[in-house]
C-alpha cells in the first residue's frame, strides 16, 4: 500500500546544518546500542535476505538473548532478590503503529520472540509475569530454568554482603545495612530519598539492554529491546525496555529510537518517543538524542543512560549522560555504504 511521503521536514535541517549530522542517509540501516556486533550482523542478514524491518529487529535481539550479551540480556543474568532471572522485551512496527511486549517474563529464554507473538496473535500490547509465561507456552515456547551457575553465584555473593546494593528506601530494617524482609517506616516528607540507589554508585554496565532500530530500504521502520533488567531488583519490577516510547519507538513518518540505561528513571521520561517527536519537529537524530538526555539531566544529573536515533532517510545519531565512569557510549551501525558493521562512539554530554 502506498505511503504518503513526509521527507521535506527531515531534509531541511540536513541541508542547513550538515556538520551536525553524525551519519548521512543510507538505507537500509541497522542501529543498535552497545558493541553487540553479532546482533547487528544477524539483523542485517535478515534484511538482505528479504526480511522485513520487524524480522530484522527480532533476529538481532534474539542473538543477544542466546549469547547473553554482557550478561544483561537473556538467561543467566541479573538475578532478582530471590535469585531468579526474568526478562523484558518489546518489538514495534512503525508502519502500522503496533507493539508486542513482555515484562517480568519467567522461564522462557526467547523474550523477543514472545513479544513478536503478542504483536501478531493478540490485540494486547504488553503481557507480564506468570501469565506471560503461560501465553508463551501456548505459542510453543519451552518452559525452562533461566538460572545458571554464574547467576546463582552472583546471588549468593549478594546475600553474603548483606544484600548490597538493593533498591529499597524508607523501610526498616535499614536497607543499607541489612537484608529484608522490610516494612515501611514513617517518613517526614514525601521526597525523603533515604538510601536511593543511583548509577553514580553502582556498576554503570549493569543495564546494557540491547535496543535496536531498523530502517528498511523502502522506509519501513521497526524498533525493539531485550533485557534481563537490573541486578537484585525487587521481584515484579519492570523497567523501561518493554514500554512503548520508553525502551523503543518507531514511526514510518519520522524514524525510530531506542534507549538503554537506568530503566526506572528512563521510564519516567519516555525518551524514545520524545526523540522521535524532536525529529518530527525538524531536529536531526544527533540533536534529538542530545535533547532527550538534557531533558532528563535537569531532574537526574547522575542518571546512567543513552539513546540512539535514526530518521527515515537513514541519518542517525546517539547521545549519553556523562558520568565519572561513563564518558562515552558505543553503538553499532550497518548500512548500505558500509561493507561491515561498524562500532561508533559518541562523547557523553
Image (spheres, rainbow, N blue to C red):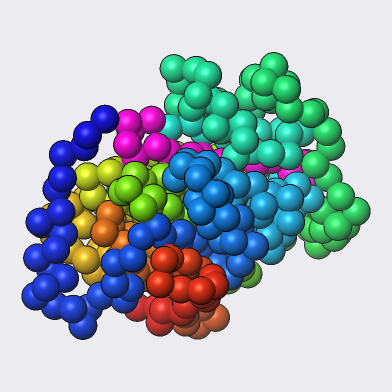
Within the magenta stretch, is there residue 92? Answer: yes
Residue 77 can be seen in this image = yes
What range is drawn magenta here? 83-98
Residue 111 percent coordinates (x, y): 64, 38
Q: Is residue 92 above or below residue 16?
A: above
Residue 239 percent coordinates (x, y): 52, 45
Quadrant housing residue 313: bottom left
Q: Nearer the viewer, residue 242 or 216?
A: 216
Q: Nearer the viewer, residue 200 or 135?
A: 135
Residue at image position (33%, 73%) is 23
Residue at image position (83%, 45%) is 147
Residue at image position (50%, 17%) is 122
Residue 168 percent coordinates (x, y): 60, 49
Quadrant housing residue 340: bottom right
Residue at image position (86%, 57%) is 150
Left or right: 243 in relation to 15: right
Left or right: 180 in relation to 168: right
Within the magenta stretch, is there residue 310? Answer: no
Number of on-image labels: 0
Q: Please identify the quadrant where the C terminus is shown.
A: bottom left
Residue 312 percent coordinates (x, y): 28, 54
Left or right: 208 in relation to 327: right
Q: Please identify the quadrant where the N terminus is shown.
A: top left
Q: Is residue 85 above or below residue 257?
A: above
Q: Is residue 223 above or below residue 33?
A: above
Residue 206 can be seen in this image = no
Q: Nearer the viewer, residue 153 or 102?
A: 102
Q: Residue furthest front?
A: 49
Q: Is residue 85 above or below residue 291?
A: above
Amino acid at each position: 500500500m502506498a505511503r504518503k511521503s513526509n521527507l521535506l521536514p527531515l531534509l531541511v535541517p540536513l541541508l542547513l546544518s550538515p556538520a551536525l549530522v553524525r551519519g548521512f542517509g543510507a538505507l537500509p540501516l541497522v542501529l543498535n546500542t552497545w558493541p553487540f556486533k553479532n546482533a547487528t550482523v544477524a539483523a542485517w542478514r535478515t534484511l538482505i535476505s528479504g526480511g522485513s524491518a520487524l524480522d530484522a529487529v527480532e533476529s538481532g535481539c534474539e542473538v543477544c538473548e542466546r549469547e547473553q550479551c554482557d550478561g544483561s540480556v537473556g538467561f543467566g543474568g541479573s538475578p532478582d532478590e530471590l535469585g531468579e532471572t526474568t526478562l523484558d522485551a518489546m518489538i514495534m512496527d512503525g508502519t502500522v503503529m503496533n507493539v508486542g511486549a513482555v515484562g517480568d517474563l519467567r522461564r522462557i529464554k526467547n523474550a523477543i520472540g514472545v513479544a513478536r507473538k503478542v504483536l501478531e496473535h493478540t490485540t494486547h500490547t504488553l503481557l507480564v509475569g506468570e501469565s506471560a509465561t503461560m501465553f508463551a507456552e501456548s505459542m510453543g515456547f519451552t518452559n525452562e530454568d533461566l538460572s545458571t551457575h554464574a547467576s546463582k553465584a552472583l546471588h549468593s555473593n549478594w546475600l553474603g554482603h548483606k544484600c548490597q546494593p538493593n533498591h529499597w528506601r524508607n523501610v526498616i530494617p535499614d536497607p543499607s545495612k541489612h537484608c529484608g524482609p522490610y516494612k515501611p517506616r514513617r517518613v517526614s516528607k514525601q521526597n525523603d530519598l533515604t538510601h536511593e540507589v543511583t548509577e553514580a554508585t553502582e556498576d554503570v554496565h549493569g543495564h546494557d539492554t540491547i535496543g535496536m532500530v531498523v530502517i528498511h530500504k523502502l522506509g519501513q521502520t521497526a524498533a525493539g529491546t531485550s533485557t534481563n533488567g537490573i541486578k537484585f531488583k525487587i521481584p515484579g519490577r519492570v523497567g523501561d525496555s518493554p514500554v512503548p516510547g520508553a525502551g523503543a519507538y518507531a514511526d514510518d513518518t519520522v524514524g525510530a529510537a531506542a534507549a538503554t540505561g537506568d530503566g526506572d528513571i528512563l521510564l519516567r521520561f519516555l525518551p524514545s518517543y520524545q526523540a522521535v517527536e524532536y525529529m518530527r519537529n525538524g531536529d536531526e537524530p544527533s540533536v534529538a538524542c542530545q535533547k532527550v538526555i538534557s531533558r532528563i539531566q535537569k531532574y537526574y544529573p547522575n542518571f546512567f543512560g543513552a539513546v540512539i536515533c535514526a530518521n527515515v532517510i537513514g541519518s542517525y545519531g546517539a547521545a549519553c549522560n556523562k558520568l565519572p565512569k561513563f564518558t562515552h557510549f558505543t553503538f553499532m551501525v550497518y548500512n548500505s555504504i558500509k561493507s561491515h558493521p561498524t562500532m561508533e562512539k559518541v562523547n557523553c554530554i
